[in-house]
Image (cartoon, helix red, strand yellow):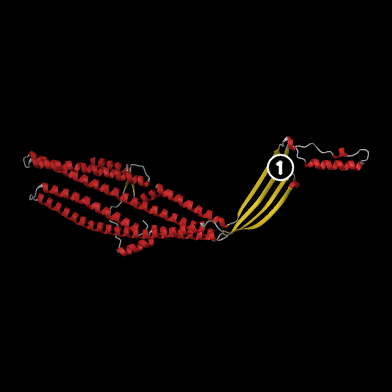
Amino acid sequence: MKRIIIILSLCLIVSMFWSISLDESISLAKQNNKDLLIAKEDLGKADQTYYQVRANLYPQLNIVGAYNLNKTYLPDSAIVPPVDLSLGLDPNTASSNDYYLANAMSAALNSLVPSSPMEEGSVALALQMQQVLFTGGKLNYGIKTADIYRNIQQLNYQLKEQDIVLKTTQMFYSCLLTDKLVNVQEAALETARQHLTQVEIFADEGLVSEFDVMRARLEVAKLEPLLMQAQNSRDLALSAFRNQIGVNDTTMVPEGDFILPTELDLTLDEAITQGMENRLELEMARKGTEVADLQLKTEKSGYFPNLALQASAALYTKADEYAVEGDDFGTNYSVGLGISFPLFNGFATKAKVNSAKFNYRQSQYQEYKYEDLIRLEITQNYKKLKHAEENYLVQEENMKMAERSLQLAQLRYENQVGIQLEVFDAQTTLSAIQLQYYQAIYEVISATRELQKSIGIIL
């Protein structure tokens, strides 16, 4: 019955935790990491910038329209009385034709005199087209620059993704390591407590001295804070890991094999060569140099003329009243070729060209600097991995010796040749070696991942 209860309790404890694999952790980190999400938005913005610049290759069409109503009140000084030329005719000598002509002329003159208020209505509608024909290469260079910038953002996204994969992997195995360390410390503390119980029994029987009892108690007292420290390190590692993958569920725990990765079979020179060919940072630096070169060419194109074609078709009208009639409309068509040729701008173009040259050489130096730094990084990571592998081999041998020492101590104790204190010392030594052994495995895993990233392997 007790066995069934224990099994059910263990099942309940296991069901309370959510185990997550390394691949699942990396997938969640990619989905939830804020820096990667920001980089993805930058990539989308770069795409739209490219399309925006490329749009200048096509004709630019615009419809422009306006409908205006004007009402003007003239000052009294601008308003003259109506003209009547018939008043100047002699009624005795003027004929009816003279009066007719005088009235006609009066009406014509009065029509030229402004009235107040003045009401006007106007409608205008035009279709305008502008097509760039020649810009000295500035437009083509701008399109190429926008395309390279888009590629740089894509590389930047991949670089951040690689950083997230590496950091998530290291945190994942760090959680596994701290869990191993807690298990080792718990086992060591349990062994120390069992030894203390046995020593106290021997002390009651007078078989050991008070010094042996105090020593056993000190061993327990020494291991208890180490266990608490290991548990705290595990909690901190789990918190950092959950934050990395964007999960706040405290029941989530990493689960996987804490074993050595596949050994990288390559020399230092091969690693450096591979890194020089595949590192994303170098590719970004090279594209930055290409952008600087295009900028230099763009500034040089300032010496060339600009040529554009312009055309428009307009429909317009103007009426001396608010109402616009059908016969008030007129049309206008125009086409023209515009050219702008720079003659002198105070040597501003020359200064821009020289500045672009400095920027281009600076980009080249930056590219060389990245090459040196990456070469140094690969060398350091390569040697770090070799040291970690050598340390693992040493710790592996130490584990074998510690396990063998414990077996001999137990055998001596069983044959009443040795004392239990020897067994306890062997168990304590084995626990310490186990801590170093698991730490060595973690260092090999971490160093392998770092070297893979530094030589451009997609993690």
Say whether residue 64 is left or right of residue 216: right
The residue under the point 32% across, 56% down is: 450
Res 287 seen here = no
Quadrant (top left/top right/bottom left/bottom right) for the N terminus: top left
The residue under the point 20% across, 46% down is: 187
Q: Mark 1 falls on what kind of element?
A: strand
Q: Nearer the viewer, residue 83 or 166?
A: 83
Q: Residue lying farthest left?
A: 206
- Mark 1 crowdedness (10 Å alpha carbons): few <14, some 14-19, many ≥20: some
Q: Position of residue 165 (x, y in %)?
A: 36, 52
Q: Nearer the viewer, residue 308 or 3?
A: 308
Identity of the amino acid at label 1? Gly
Q: Position of residue 27 (x, y in %)?
A: 39, 50
The residue under the point 18% across, 50% down is: 430
Which residue corresponds to mark 1? 121
Q: Residue lying farthest right?
A: 92
Quadrant (top left/top right/bottom left/bottom right) for the C terminus: bottom left
